[in-house]
Amino acid sequence: MRVLGLLLAGMALVTAQQAGEKPKSAMDKQTLADYVRHVVPYSPPVTVTVGEMKASEVPGFKEVMVRASLGNVSEEKLFYVSNDGLKILSATVYDVRQHPFKAELDKLKTDLQPSMGTAGAPVVIVLFSDFQCGYCREEAKMLREKLLKAYPTQVRLYFKDYPLTQIHAWAKPAAVAGRCVFQQKPVAFWDYHDWVFENQASITEANFKEKAGEFYKAKSLNAAAIEACVAGKAAEAEVEKSMAEARSLMVSSTPTMFLNGRRLAGSVQWEALRQLIDMELGYQAVHKNAGENCCQVSLSPAATQK
C-alpha cells in the first residue's frame, strides 16, 4: 500500500507538471502570503509579508512570522509550516516540562521599571499601557484602588510603556516624560501616572508640555532636569525598547497584562482578575516556577513601589 501511495503521488506530480502547473507549497512565500490573506482574512489594501522560515520546537515543522500592515498599523502572526510545505498550523505550543508561558516570561524584562507591590511576590503582573488610552485609564484606576488592598504582599505590578503612536498623538511624549520623572524620583512616578490618567480628557498634544510642567512644580520636581532628560533622547530610547518588547510579544492593543506570563489582552474586570490571581497563587505554592521567587525577574533598588 505504501508503494502504491508513492506511485499515485508521483503520478499526480507528473500530471501537474505536464499541465504546466507549479505544485503548491507553503515554503513559497507568495503562496503562503496568499493563503494567509484568505484565511485571516486580510482585505486587498493590507500588505502581507512573509518572513524567513526558522527551525521550530514542533517536530516536522518550521516556524515563520507573517506580518500584515496598512499604513502605520501592523500586526504579526506566527505560523508553522510542515517540512513538505503542504500543511500550515496556527497554534500555541506548550511543553509540559516547563511553565506554560515560559516563552513570554523569557521576553518580559522588568529591570529598572516602575513597580508597586512586594519584592519577591509569587505573582508578577507586567502591564503594557498607553497614557492616552481610555481603556488603560479605567484599568489603571481599578489596579491602583484594588490590587494592593487585596494582595498586599502576594503580587507585584510592573508598568511598561506601549504608546500607540499611530492613533495617539501625545502618548509617546507622556511616556518619555514619565521615564524622566521615574529616573529623577522613582516614588513620584505613580503620582505622575495617576495625574496623566486623571487629566487625560484635558491634555492635548499642544498643551502637554505646559501641563506637565505644572505637575512637576506641584510635586517639587526639578522641571529643568526633566526637560533636559526628555530632550536628551535616552528616555525615549527606553520607551522604544519597551515598545519593541511589546511587539516581540505580539501585543497589538492596550491595555495588555501578563500575569506570570499569561496574556490578558484588553480590559479585565476586577473579579476575573482576582480569580486568575488566586489560581496562580495556588499554582505557584506547588510549582514555584514563575513570579519573583523564580529566575524570570531581576529586581532593582530603583524600582521603588508606592
Image: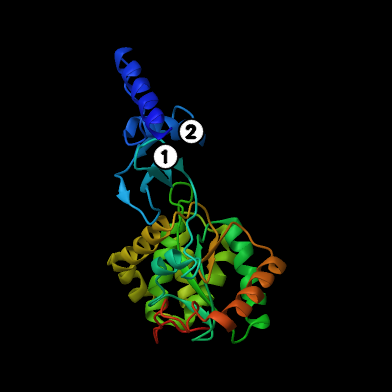
Q: Does the rendering let one see residue 220? A: no
Secondary structure beneath disc 1?
Answer: strand
Give residue 42's mark.
Answer: 2
Residue contact between numbered discs 1 and 2, judged by CB atoms under 8 Å? yes
> What residue is rendered at 34% in x and 16% in y?
15
| Residue 197 position within the rendered picture, expressed as x and y whole percent measured from the top left | 57, 65
Spatial CA distance of label 1 from label 2 is 8 Å
Q: Nearer the viewer, residue 115 or 68?
A: 68
Precedes in sequence: disc 1 or disc 2 = 2
On the image, the x and y values in percent for residue 221 come to 43, 80
Name the kind of residue labelled 2 in the image: Tyr
Residue drawn at x 40%, y 84% as measured from the top left:
302
**Residue 160 percent across, percent down from the top left:** 45, 67
Q: Amino acid at mark 1?
A: Ala
Where is residue 222, by image quadrant?
Answer: bottom left
Viewer can see residue 259: yes
Q: Residues within 10 Å of mark 1 (few under 14, many from 20)?
A: some
Residue extending farthest to the right is: 271
Image: 218 above or below 102:
below
Give the residue number, with chain letter if any, for mark 1. 68
* 10 Å crowding of disc 2: few (<14), some (14-19), many (20+): some
Tell me the quarter of the picture where residue 106 sits.
Answer: bottom left
**Nearer to the camera, 206 or 22:** 22
